[in-house]
Image (spheres, grey):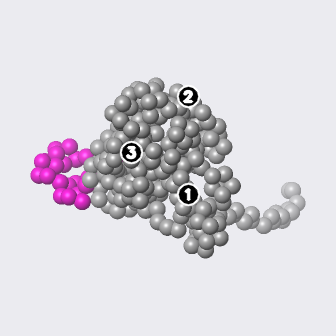
Amino acid sequence: MEEPPWNDWVLDALFAPTCVACRRRLGPAREAAVCRQCWNAIRIVRPPWCDRCGEPLRSWRTLAEVNGQCARCLAQPPRYDQARAFGLYEGALRQIVRALKYRGHQSLGAPLGGLMRQAGWDLLSQAEAVVPVPLHPWRRLRRGFNQADELARRLGLPVWRPLRRWSLGAPQAGLRGEHRRRNVRHAYTVSYAGTSAFSKRPRRVVLIDDVMTTGATLDACGGALRDAGVEWVGALTAARASTPIGASTAAAPRPRPPRTRRPWTPHR
């Protein structure tokens, strides 16, 4: 990362800003509002992973057993072709994404976008445009910006915005499993109004969002694009909430202490 300009040293002395992830004083060694230590602490998503959804797999042997795809993708193929993410949605990266999304730190879009570009270069090299996952107009008005759009503008490809979300629904962050899928089912449509900058509609695109959890949102958006005639849909996110497939997610129950009888003593 580049060294900060001299005026950053002056601002540090005057205002003593803190890192949005660890809350410690930033100092000059920072990128946007995050200290270098927190950027370096991010756990990067590395192979082996499912070739379709990008879910980390427990081992290369697991990958061979399912022909390159995880059991979920084999049972119910998503409506996007490939998905990738930069890092795991935990620790420092979780705080960084939340600072961008909920606390208005739009300056984080540039460094996160650069990391996404490295992680998703194979998808981006196949695409003609990137498509940010849209917010409902009311949510967009309240937040003041769309974090997916902030990230999409940093990826070096034209930004195409044909998707609309007209169904508000509950925030995905508060839902789990099948409830997430029901919440976004038929929530996204394609409208070409306002996309006249593209003389020819892209046939190969990459969906952009901040976090992939179950993949329900990306699946719904991919389905809307496919129904509108897009031939190939990739998906790229800054973070992924994930547990390697095949790994146990349940904590071992604590052994119950043996029951003991209290010695009987006569009442006096």
What's the mark number on residue 129?
Answer: 3
Left or right: 132 in relation to 68? left
Q: Percent from the top left, x then y, of residue 69?
A: 60, 62
Left or right: 99 in relation to 82? left
Identify the image quadrant of the C terminus. bottom right
- Distance between the alpha carbons at the discs numbered 3 and 1: 20 Å
The amino acid pointed to by label 1 is Arg
Identify the image quadrant of the N terminus. bottom left
- Asked if the residue at tag 2 contacts the one at tag 3, i.e. Cβ–Cβ closer than 8 Å, the answer is no
Q: Name the residue under label 2.
A: 167
Seen from the viewer's position, the closer of residues 163 and 197 is: 197
Of all residues, the one furthest to the bottom in this rendering is 61
Local SS, label 1 = loop
Q: Give the range drawn in magenta.
A: 1-30
Local SS, label 2 = loop
Q: Which of marks 3 and 1 is in front?
A: 3
- Distance between the alpha carbons at the discs numbered 2 and 1: 27 Å
Residue shown at the point (34%, 62%) measured from the top left: 40
Tell me if I can see residue 168 in this picture.
no
What's the mark number on residue 251?
Answer: none
Rate crowding at label 1 as few (under 14), some (14 to 19) or many (20 or more) other CA atoms within 10 Å: many
Seen from the viewer's position, the closer of residues 24 and 29 is: 29
Q: Which of marks 2 and 1 is in front?
A: 1
What type of secondary structure mainly makes up the magenta span? Answer: loop
N-terminal of the pair, mark 3 or mark 2, is 3
The amino acid pointed to by label 2 is Ser
Q: Mark 1 points at which residue?
A: 52
Q: Percent from the top left, x then y, of residue 225?
A: 52, 40
Residue shown at the point (78%, 67%) measured from the top left: 258
Above or below, 233 against 29 in this view is above
The amino acid pointed to by label 3 is Ala
Tell me if I can see residue 2 in this picture.
yes
